[in-house]
Image (cartoon, grey):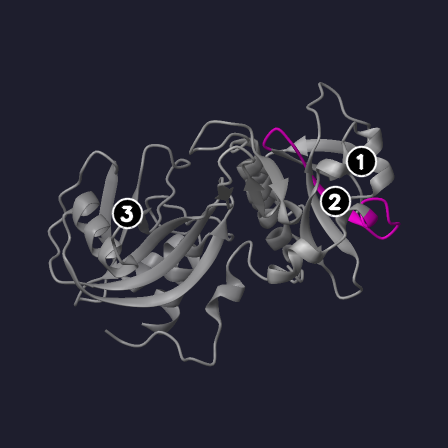
Amino acid sequence: MSCFFSFNKDLSTKNGFANNSLKRMGEERDKVDVDSLYRQKNTRYFVLSKSQQLIKNLHPFDALFTPEEIIILGGQLEEAYLLGFDENNAAFFALSVPQRDKYPDNIQAIDLRAITRSGLLKHEDLGAIAQARSLVLWHQSHCFCSNCGKKTKVIDAGYARFCPSCERRHFPRTDPVAIMLVIDKKGRCLLGRSASFPENMLSALAGFVEVGETVEEAVKRELFEEAGIKADKVLYHSSQPWPFPSSLMMGFYAQAATTDIKLNDELEFCHWFTKQETRQILENTHPKGFKPPSKMAIARQLMVGFVENY
């Protein structure tokens, strides 16, 4: 298999939800005096209501809220989780506020997938939004200890929960996913779709990494399980945070050892495409009307890399 990239390139910077510039503090979170930050004038909040993102209808659209705006929305500042600090040392938090039937005229609640498809927000904001969304949704589903069932409390500025009953610590989870574009010896790539995809959209194959499994093993297993294709070489491309609700997509190219497609129940369509046909899909000019993944998806970057570099 040809080498698709050199080590002086960070291909992940082109993926959606990448380029989060906030200083996360890491090991220093437990030393941060968050109580002193909640109401500072330059503190800003990314806000969810249920699983929807709140944005302000400005030009351009804005996903950041001041402490005063949070109070108007009925949010509790002390329930926010610290994301990090910007280059001016302003603190950024993630917070959930009560759902409403109607929000103030300049605010709307919108699904994050719709935001990314429409390009409403600046690309550089989406990485922090992914961090905020994943963190808020994790806290919403982990209020109780998985060990003893008792209620847990927030610690480390929002990056852990602690159970006072059994003294167990719980940390935000990220689900690893392998996504792969397999290429055969004729220079064709394999694309498929599940029934849940938008009409005519094709993508690379993907699946969760299982316990006790390397990501490379997951690539080969998923290819065989979903399409009956065996692969003998795997090459890493890049990764992408995917906040639906909290996955880490790890992208690979794979070299096909077999080419006969045998679909399982997960895919409704799968086919080999030449480089020219893949280019047509990316440009929305394929004669059969096939469409590419969203520009935010790592699958699209794998397809672009195949067309441009293979």
Residue appearing at x 37%, y 33% in the figure: 196
Q: Could you tell me how far apart the alpha carbons at marks 3 and 1 are, in whole angstroms?
A: 40 Å
Say whether marks 3 and 1 touch (CB < 8 Å).
Answer: no
Tell whether 189 sits left or right of 242. Answer: left
The residue lying toward the viewer, choosing from 268 and 265, is 265
Q: Residues within 10 Å of mark 2 (few under 14, many from 20)?
A: many
SS at badge 3: loop
Residue appearing at x 65%, y 63% in the figure: 21
Q: Could you tell me how far apart the alpha carbons at marks 2 and 3 are, in whole angstroms?
A: 35 Å
Q: Residues within 10 Å of mark 3 (few under 14, many from 20)?
A: few
Tell me which corner region of the image, top left, top right, bottom left or bottom right, holds residue 161.
top right
Tell whether 155 sits left or right of 217. Answer: right
Q: Is residue 222 visible?
A: yes
As for residue 153 lying within the magenta part, the answer is: no
Q: Label 3: which residue?
A: 210
Q: Is residue 133 above or below residue 22?
A: above
Residues in magenta, as a range: 36-51
Q: x and y percent of residue 159 in the render?
A: 59, 48
Q: Could you tell me how far apart the alpha carbons at marks 2 and 1 are, in whole angstroms?
A: 8 Å
Q: Earlier in the sequence, mark 2 or mark 3?
A: 2
The residue lying toward the viewer, choosing from 88 and 115, is 88
Q: Earlier in the sequence, mark 2 or mark 1?
A: 2
Q: Which mark is residue 45?
A: 2
Q: Earlier in the sequence, mark 3 or mark 1?
A: 1
Q: x and y percent of residue 302 in the render?
A: 38, 61
